[in-house]
């Protein structure tokens, strides 16, 4: 660590491992918003969590599912940001430098998410059927030979160890990426860009493997009989789509409050819009591949997943997912004009983030309410609560450093970027 | 120093640090034209005749094998009762897969503004088209009654008979023929400006006439370029989903069934990754040789090859991870048939094929983590051959190991190809190289106009600071654009 960038104290470390470097920021890239930037989401977050706590006291089963959906939503945004940063370094991308600080700040959410994930441990028994040990006991009437065969993977100690491993990997790579970039802001040493690229290469491999398995562990094992090899890619596709929406919305928020005007331009928004469109289609491609192959094969152990989502009222939710997560955004975002019409693009980004949450809801909630489709108010409160706290920490982190990697050698190319 | 000039210094610094130039050897615009066009104009070298004769021998072999097959029927192949799909489908998937790199380079890398694609897109697209032709041979000849092949098309007829629209084999007909058509049009559109260059350089009447017709009246006018660029963008946008859809549909051929080892949801993206992987390996194999013989090492530089090797490393690792995911989920599924299929792949009678696949596709490309190795021409050539072999074996492993031991142990069998199987496959290389050598001989193997477009001289401000007074005006513009 160089002289000028210091580690923060251990309490703040969870939110930001580095001391503020805001004073070093170029005036054009300085965070000038008031503390409301993070106080407001924090207030919403706390309010949401307090309401959710009522849910925990009255209907803990529901609460844990709602909480898991909201937490997975935040985790997927962070993983999407992780992949975005890594890919930008590996491809030596020029266009995206002016917006890269947004995902860079997002990836330091992993430690906070690990802490916010702790309540899930207490809800494991409610969430994951495979935690019921009698399933593995041949003497028990509940004995399930299929699940007993999976005991070597689906058991509490190994699950916890895997989660710990994923978070250690993600935190380690993110720490390198985040601190290197901030350090470059203050001391533009030669070689930092090369180091970022090196850690990105390792980060891509580690991130790909851990994300695929994490998706299976967190979401797929909710329905422990069901399995799908594509599931990790499905999770990635949605996450990478959602991070585009986040970057657009954060940029718009900053610009509305008088920052980065003339730095992030409509050309950058258009490129983000292209990726938003592209990965909406990619998500649909993956979702269709999974659905069509299972439908066609018609094997009961696989169709069970879709069967639960095609009856007892869930068929409406499935139709909403198809129409609103794919058909509507496909039509709206197809043209060039809609990606350059910023109010519309902003609206579609909010839309897609809601749909991204809805996607996880559609995966998790039918496990709980398989007899009767239902959406609980705690689904919303836990989502807003977690997302509020998550956003507050993110905004606070943004306020402590330059809003743009100001000494990145490719920044000038990004500033003068035009989308012909 | 005002902000504008500071930004400008930053910009030139970035230029300096960013990337090695795409074209080396201090070539000028005219050198590029000369370097590429002269090969189509000079007297045919003897070596070309040699290579072409060899390719024609292969083509004859293919035709003889096909004639032998038609005369005798598919009994001359090594197919047996559980293994009803053998070399034909393996070779079909192999060749279709090869094609994908060309479309990725010409379409997806274009949308991603990867300028290095310009040096290799022409030859890669040519490879795509020829590979798809080779691929189409196999579904055509495997139907048995080949004279009824047109029944695969939904043509109205007096019998009121239609193909089975629910079958992925029919989707293949649509997917591959669409792919072939779009690739051909895309390739031809890209060729037009270069053919016009050949026309303008033509010295004989015949040459002028042929290139004149093919150039479709191209003059290089501003309006031509505007239309051309729009068409190019639209074709790239059309070709991009095709890169994913074609091999996804090919994967459906297997994955819609309930055969263990075939029926798994990861197949579509995993096949696409594998196709790009194998295609890039083939591009490296071909271009390592072609750039040497044609002396275009300054246009297709080691940097270009290195970037392709990075793609090989990336997609190879993705494919390898898909193998591992499949294996893990087969265990996780708790379905004994799935579990058996994958253990049988690894340790059964075809373990030799499985481990050939694993080492060629997952392990060998890992050498490309080392910069020295991925910039070493000999080394990358060897690895690219291994990848070609490995990806052929991947399709062999998928097809044969899943079939040869099905649900009924009494019908288990071992599949061995016959000489007809092997020689037909060898013959398709003859077909491929016949086309490819004709391409090398008669068409510009590098997209001349596109390469010029990514050279620094193509920048309208390249000649600033040379005393013509234009740069002062330019500085004002930069100022206006950046500080609002």
Image (tube, rainbow, N blue to C red):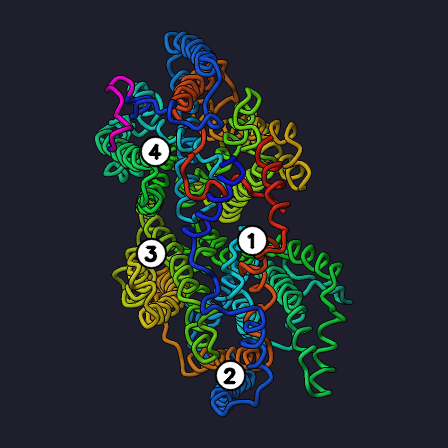
Determine whether the residue tagged by mark 1 lies in a helix, strand or loop. loop
Judge by depth and name the residue closer to the eye, A257 or B309: A257
In the picture, measured across the screen, residue A348 lies left or right of residue A71, that is: right
The answer for which chain carries disc 1 is: B
Residue A8 falls inside the magenta stretch: yes
User: Subunit of mark 3?
Assistant: B
Foreground tag (1 vs 2): 1
Q: Residues within 10 Å of mark 4 (few under 14, many from 20)?
A: many
Please provide percent x and percent y for residue A352: 56, 30
Can residue B180 be seen in the rendering of this structure? Answer: no
Q: CA distance from mark 1 to mark 3?
A: 69 Å
Relative depth, front residue between B284 and A342: A342
The residue beneath circle 2 is B62
Placement of B113 over or under B100, stated as above or below: above
**Is disc 3 placed on a helix, strand or loop?**
helix
Residue receiving disc 3 = B341
- Local crowd size for mark 3, using a 10 Å CA cut-off: few (<14), some (14–19), many (≥20): many
Stretch of the chain drawn in magenta: A2-12
Q: Main secondary structure of the magenta part?
A: loop
CA gap between label 4 and label 3 equals 44 Å
- Single out the mark in the foreground, 3 or 2: 2
3D distance between C-alphas at marks 1 and 2: 61 Å
Circle 2 crowding by C-alpha within 10 Å: few under 14, some 14–19, many from 20: many
Q: Label 1 belongs to which residue?
A: B465
- In the image, residue B279 sits, relative to residue A357, either above or below, namely below
Q: Is residue B150 left or right of residue B63?
A: right
- Mark 4 and 1 residues: CB-CB less than 8 Å, in contact? no
Same chain for mark 1 and mark 2? The answer is: yes
Reading the chain from its start, which is encountered first: label 3 or label 2?
Answer: 2
């Amino acid at each position: 660590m160089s002289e000028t960038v210091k580690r923060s104290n251990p309490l703040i470390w969870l939110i930001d491992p580095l001391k503020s470097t805001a004073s070093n920021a170029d005036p054009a890239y300085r965070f000038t918003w008031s503390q409301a930037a993070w106080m407001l989401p924090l207030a919403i977050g706390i309010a949401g969590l307090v309401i959710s706590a009522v849910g925990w006291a009255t209907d803990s089963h529901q609460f844990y599912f709602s909480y898991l959906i909201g937490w997975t939503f935040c985790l997927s945004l962070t993983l999407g940001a992780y992949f975005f940063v890594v890919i930008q370094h590996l491809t030596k991308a020029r266009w995206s430098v002016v917006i890269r600080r947004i995902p860079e700040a997002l990836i330091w959410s992993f430690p906070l998410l690990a802490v916010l994930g702790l309540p899930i441990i207490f809800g494991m028994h409610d969430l994951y059927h495979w935690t019921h040990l009698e399933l593995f006991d041949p003497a028990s009437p509940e004995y399930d030979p299929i699940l007993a065969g999976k005991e070597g993977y689906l058991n509490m100690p190994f699950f916890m160890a895997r989660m710990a491993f994923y978070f250690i990997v993600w935190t380690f790579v993110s720490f390198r990426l985040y601190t290197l970039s901030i350090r470059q802001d203050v001391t533009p040493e030669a070689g930092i860009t090369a180091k970022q690229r090196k850690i990105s290469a390792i980060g891509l491999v580690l991130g790909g493997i851990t994300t695929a398995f994490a998706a299976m562990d967190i979401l797929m094992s909710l329905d422990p009989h069901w399995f799908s090899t594509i599931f990790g890619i499905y999770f990635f596709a949605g996450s990478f789509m959602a991070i585009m929406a986040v970057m657009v919305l954060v940029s718009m928020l900053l610009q509305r409050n008088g920052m980065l005007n003339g730095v992030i331009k409509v050309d950058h928004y258009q490129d983000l819009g292209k990726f938003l469109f592209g990965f909406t289609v990619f998500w649909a491609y993956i979702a269709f591949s999974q659905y069509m192959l299972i439908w066609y094969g018609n094997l009961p152990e696989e169709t069970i997943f879709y069967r639960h989502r095609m009856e007892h009222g869930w068929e409406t939710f499935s139709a909403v997912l198809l129409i609103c997560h794919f058909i509507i955004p496909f039509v709206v975002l197809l043209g060039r004009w809609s990606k350059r019409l910023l109010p519309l693009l902003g609206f579609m980004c909010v839309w897609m983030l809601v749909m991204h949450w809805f996607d996880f809801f559609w995966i998790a909630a039918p496990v709980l309410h398989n007899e009767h489709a239902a959406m609980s108010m705690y689904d919303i409160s836990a989502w807003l609560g977690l997302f509020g706290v998550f956003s507050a920490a993110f905004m606070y982190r943004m306020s402590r450093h330059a809003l743009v990697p100001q000494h990145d050698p490719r920044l000038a190319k990004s500033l003068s970027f035009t989308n012909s | 120093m005002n902000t504008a000039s500071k930004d400008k210094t930053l910009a030139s610094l970035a230029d300096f640090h960013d990337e090695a130039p795409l074209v080396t050897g201090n070539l000028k615009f005219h050198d590029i034209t000369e370097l590429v066009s002269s090969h189509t104009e000079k007297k045919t070298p003897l070596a070309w005749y040699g290579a072409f004769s060899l390719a024609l021998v292969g083509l004859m072999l293919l035709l003889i094998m096909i004639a032998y097959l038609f005369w005798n029927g598919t009994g001359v192949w090594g197919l047996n009762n559980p293994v009803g799909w053998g070399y034909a489908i393996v070779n079909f998937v192999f060749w279709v897969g090869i094609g994908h790199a060309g479309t990725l380079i010409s379409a997806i890398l274009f949308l991603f503004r990867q300028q290095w694609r310009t040096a290799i897109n022409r030859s890669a697209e040519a490879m795509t088209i020829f590979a798809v032709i080779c691929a189409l041979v196999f579904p055509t000849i495997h139907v048995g009654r080949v004279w009824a092949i047109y029944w695969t098309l939904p043509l109205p007829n007096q019998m009121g008979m239609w193909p089975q629209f629910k079958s992925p084999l029919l989707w293949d007909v649509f997917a591959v023929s669409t792919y072939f058509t779009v690739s051909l049009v895309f390739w031809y559109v890209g060729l037009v400006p270069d053919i016009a260059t050949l026309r303008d350089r033509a010295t004989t009447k015949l040459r002028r006439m042929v290139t004149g017709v093919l150039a479709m009246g191209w003059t290089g006018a501003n309006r031509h370029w505007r239309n051309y660029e729009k068409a190019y963008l639209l074709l790239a946008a059309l070709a991009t989903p095709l890169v994913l859809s074609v091999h996804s549909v090919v994967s459906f051929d297997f994955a819609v069934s309930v055969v263990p080892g075939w029926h798994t949801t990861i197949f579509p993206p995993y096949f696409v990754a594998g196709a790009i992987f194998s295609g890039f390996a083939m591009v490296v194999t071909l271009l390592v040789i072609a750039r040497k013989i044609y002396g275009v090492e300054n246009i297709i530089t080691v940097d270009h090859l290195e970037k392709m090797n990075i793609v090989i490393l990336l997609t190879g690792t993705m494919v390898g991870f898909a193998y591992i995911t499949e294996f893990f989920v087969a265990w996780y599924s708790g379905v004994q048939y799935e579990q058996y299929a994958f253990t049988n792949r690894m340790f059964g009678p075809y373990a030799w094929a499985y481990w050939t696949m694993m080492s060629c596709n997952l392990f060998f490309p890992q050498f490309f983590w080392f910069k020295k190795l991925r910039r070493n021409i000999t080394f990358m050539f060897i690895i690219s051959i291994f990848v070609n072999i490995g990806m052929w074996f991947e399709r062999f492993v998928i097809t044969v190991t899943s079939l040869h031991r099905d649900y009924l142990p009494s019908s288990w069998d071992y599949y061995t190809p016959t000489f007809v199987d092997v020689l037909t496959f060898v013959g398709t290389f003859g077909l491929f190289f016949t086309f490819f050598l004709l391409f090398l001989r008669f068409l510009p193997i590098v997209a001349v106009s596109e390469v010029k477009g990514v050279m620094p001289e193509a920048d309208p401000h390249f000649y600033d600071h040379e005393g013509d007074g234009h740069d002062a005006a330019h500085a004002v513009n930069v100022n206006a654009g950046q500080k609002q």
